[in-house]
Image (cartoon, rainbow, N blue to C red):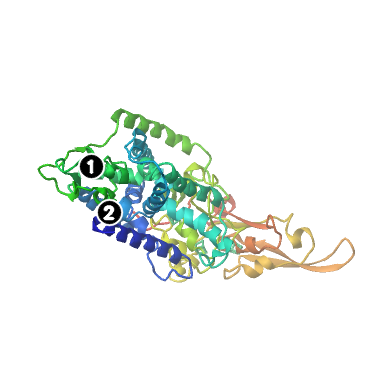
Amino acid sequence: MGGLRGVRRIYAAFFLGLFGFLLWAGEFERLKGFEVGLFLQLDPLTALGGFLTSHTLYKGLALALLILIPTLFLGRFFCSWICPLGIVNQVLSHIFHRRRAVESWEENRYRPVYRVKYYLLVVLLVFAGLGSLQTGLLDPIALIYRSFTLSLLPAVDRAGGGGWFALPAVFHGGVLIGGVLLAILLANRLITRFWCRALCPLGALLGWCAQWSLWRIRRDVDRCNQCKQCLRACQGAADPDGALRHTECHLCMNCIEACGTQALHYGLAGSRSSIGRPLDLNRRRVVEVALAAVVAVPMTRSTLSPRSTPTPEVIRPPGSLPEAQFLARCIKCGLCMRVCPTNVLQPALLEAGFEGLWTPLLMNAVGYCEHHCVLCGQVCPTAAIRPLSVAEKVGAPPFTKPVRLGTAFFDRGRCLPWAMDVPCIVCEETCPTSPKAIWYETVAITSRDGRKVTLKRPFVQPELCIGCGICENKCPVTDLAAIRVSSVGESRSGDNRMLLNQQSGWIEGTIDTGLG
Ligand code: SF4
Ligand code: SF4
Ligand code: SF4
């Protein structure tokens, strides 16, 4: 192992190790100030998508310029040197293809299907331009982080490989999320780095930038004997044996290593360098795809979602922006769900509409929002959940009101003291507010079999309830708790209010998000 390929392998091992470490450190007991969202902050597609939807560049995402600007000069180095999904694909492709008996140079040629990634990028950017942030569905960093966090690592813990989560974690629809990643990895068996070559929208963005790169793989036409060993080794379908497609070149440097005549080098053009090939894109098709995306955006919005109508089960983490702004920033990365100590944060399926797929929701049947915890807002790389202090969350001075996620309601038909004459005050005991949002009246009744029973029948005082969900989570009535939280009264919304309280003056105004 030597030369530029050796250097690339060292960098790739370092960044893959760093990614693994940050995944490990994203759990709440280990967080300790690590920048667990570093790879997302470096990701130009995350930054560009967020910029188009929110018209601001969140400060952490400015790091993406560290990738974007060098790409303009050096080419698509991110794909083989830094991207964890690209590196994993590269390793798997290497393993799968080494075992093949046939020569792989012909199958490594560029194919028109590899344009699909550019069309996907156009669709995602048109969606973002119209305010719908869907880049996270296909962005490789969000995708790999989400897949590991919500599917593969919980599965590893369950299989006894333990230690990734402090408590056994489960996630809604995790098998689908993990299945997408497994399909991407298995596709390497059929075609080398199929995801990177054909589907990755971040690769497309970087490839588009790389078309002007000054440094690139160059072939000295006098030295080349057309043995095609470079094409056989190429990871990017960049046709290094002919006119190089530098938009497709991942700078894996395999071709330089494979060339027996030293005809290839990485650098500026020499007098005998071969010419390169421009970006292979059909402009008419780009316009058609963009128009199709313009039509699709209102279709995704015409489904019932909290953007159009407040939805009781869409309870967002504390500090979440109002729904439309939240959807304009959340990239579905799963960092918040990874760090949540109670596992209450779960990926939505269609509860929040198509736009909200895999965004975080509180599911109180699984966990509850810990009263003094503000971790999700601290790790969110896009400030879809803005960082809160504990004082702001609980409404301690100088703040005057706590952050409310929703409001709890009793289902008296299921509540033990109300419906079954069985004493229970679990909800009142666990309610963390001071004064407690749950109070009770003591009643003495005679049961059907003639017993005298003293009961404490609970009530919710809605203006004190913060919607943390611990009462719902701890309620001894299993399957469907006798007290349940809905999103009404959430601080982040000025509209999602109970009429009753509009009259009593409990209503707050819309919140100041503190963001541009
Ligand atoms: S603040 Fe609540 S929802 Fe957020 S991580 Fe902590 S417990 Fe989970
Ligand atoms: S809200 Fe959660 S899933 Fe969405 S961007 Fe922030 S950390 Fe990622
Ligand atoms: S959700 Fe339940 S436990 Fe939490 S503040 Fe409201 S009543 Fe109390």
Q: Nearer the viewer, residue 102 or 425?
A: 102
| Percent position of residue 264, x then y | 20, 47
Q: In the displayed structure, does residue 464 sit left or right of residue 272?
A: right
Q: Which residue is mark 1?
A: 211
Badge 1 element: loop
The residue carrying pointer 2 sits among few (fewer than 14), some (14 to 19) or many (20 or more) residues within 10 Å by Cα, namely some
Mark 1 lies within 8 Å of ligand 2 (Cβ measured):
no
Instruction: Check the image and report above or below for 249 versus 464.
Output: above
| Percent position of residue 114, x then y | 35, 37
The residue carrying pointer 1 sits among few (fewer than 14), some (14 to 19) or many (20 or more) residues within 10 Å by Cα, namely many
Q: Which residue is located at x 32 percent, y 52 percent?
A: 80
Q: Nearer the viewer, residue 427 or 504?
A: 427
Residue 410: quadrant of the picture: bottom right
Q: Which residue is mark 2?
A: 67
Q: In the displayed structure, does residue 307 sit left or right of residue 287?
A: right
Instruction: Check the image and report above or below for 290 versus 33.
Output: above
| C-alpha span from label 2 to label 1 | 15 Å
Mark 2 lies within 8 Å of ligand 2 (Cβ measured):
no
> Which quadrant: the N terminus?
bottom left
Give the mark nearest the N terminus, 2 or 1.
2
Q: Nearer the viewer, residue 235 or 289?
A: 235
Number of numbered tags placed on the structure image? 2
Q: In the displayed structure, does residue 343 sit left or right of residue 243?
A: right
Amino acid type at mark 2: Ile
| Percent position of residue 486, x then y | 59, 53
Amino acid type at mark 1: Gln
> Does the rendering let one see residue 121?
yes
Q: Nearer the viewer, residue 480 or 153?
A: 153
